[in-house]
Amino acid sequence: MKVSVALLLLRCLSITDGNDFADGKNNQPNIWTEVRDVRDMVVELKVKLDIVMKENANMAQQIQELKKENAGITEQLKISENQLEAIKRENAEQAKVAFSADLGLRGDLGPQSTEITLTFNNIFTNTGNNYNPATGLFTAPVKGVYYFRFTACGVQSKHSLGASLHKNGQKIVSVGQWRNHDQHRYGSNGAVLQLEVGDVVCMKLLPGYTIYDSPDNLSTFSGFLIFPL
Ligand SMILES: *[C@@H]1O[C@H](CO)[C@@H](O)[C@H](O)[C@H]1NC(C)=O
């Protein structure tokens, strides 16, 4: 823009220089016309310059706003990253508890005159090792809500099938099927239990009842932590 203004002025000067005023009347109006044109152009250029400068200012403002927005997004991202890290840490620290086992018997157990604790020793899963296959006892490692379920199979026609889930020695849920039935019979039950650290959950064979298992893994006991409290 400066260059064009300079060129115009040069042109104007060269006209003035190259033409003697005294040469004739004809040149005078032309010079003034040129000067007017230059003035008009300067005015026009100034208007254009104002527009460009205004646009520039707008753009600078937009850039500032974008920068601010970008800073906001960056901050939000940082917060999200921190939250994700916290969740990952919490997840890593959270106890992982799950077990599943089959009774491991080849044949019948019972009837007996007293309740006995069933030792499901054919382990499928024992994450955290909180279930002891030697004693049949599950011991809660953390306070939380747990789920336990079991299936008991029985085959003896002269005896009933029966088993029950116990928490700290207290009967929670049971299954039973009366005798005189010579097919495989099944009973299933389960419970969601809130446990304190050290609470013990196990399966017991009811007095006078039987339970059966085969290599098909017919009688099973499983449990897992749903969430800690
Ligand atoms: C019984 O459990 C064992 C795992 O201990 C497994 O290898 C086997 O295939 C299971 N039997 C059947 C019939 O599912």
Image (cartoon, rainbow, N blue to C red):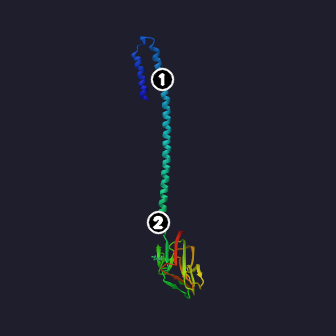
Which element type, helix, strand or loop, lies under badge 2?
A: helix
Q: Earlier in the sequence, mark 1 or mark 2?
A: 1
From what the image shows, is residue 30 above or below residue 117? above
Extreme residue in the right direction? 178
Ligand 1 closer than 8 Å to the CB at disc 2? no
- Image location of residue 200, percent across then percent down: 53, 78
Residue nearest the viewer, comparing 209 with 71: 209
The answer to which image quadrant residue 7 occupies is top left
Label 2 amino acid?
Ala
In the image, taking residue 198 as reference, residue 17 lies left or right, namely left
Instruction: Give the spatial CA distance, label 1 vs label 2.
Output: 78 Å
Q: Which mark is residue 39?
A: 1
Q: Which mark is residue 172?
A: none
From what the image shows, is residue 115 above or below residue 226? below
- Image location of residue 34, percent across then percent down: 46, 20
Residue depicted at x 43% and y 23%? 8
Label 1 amino acid?
Arg
Q: Which residue is mark 2?
A: 92
The answer to which image quadrant residue 150 occupies is bottom right
- The quarter in which the C terminus is drawn is bottom right
- Image location of residue 76, percent across then percent down: 50, 53
- The quarter in which the N terminus is drawn is top left
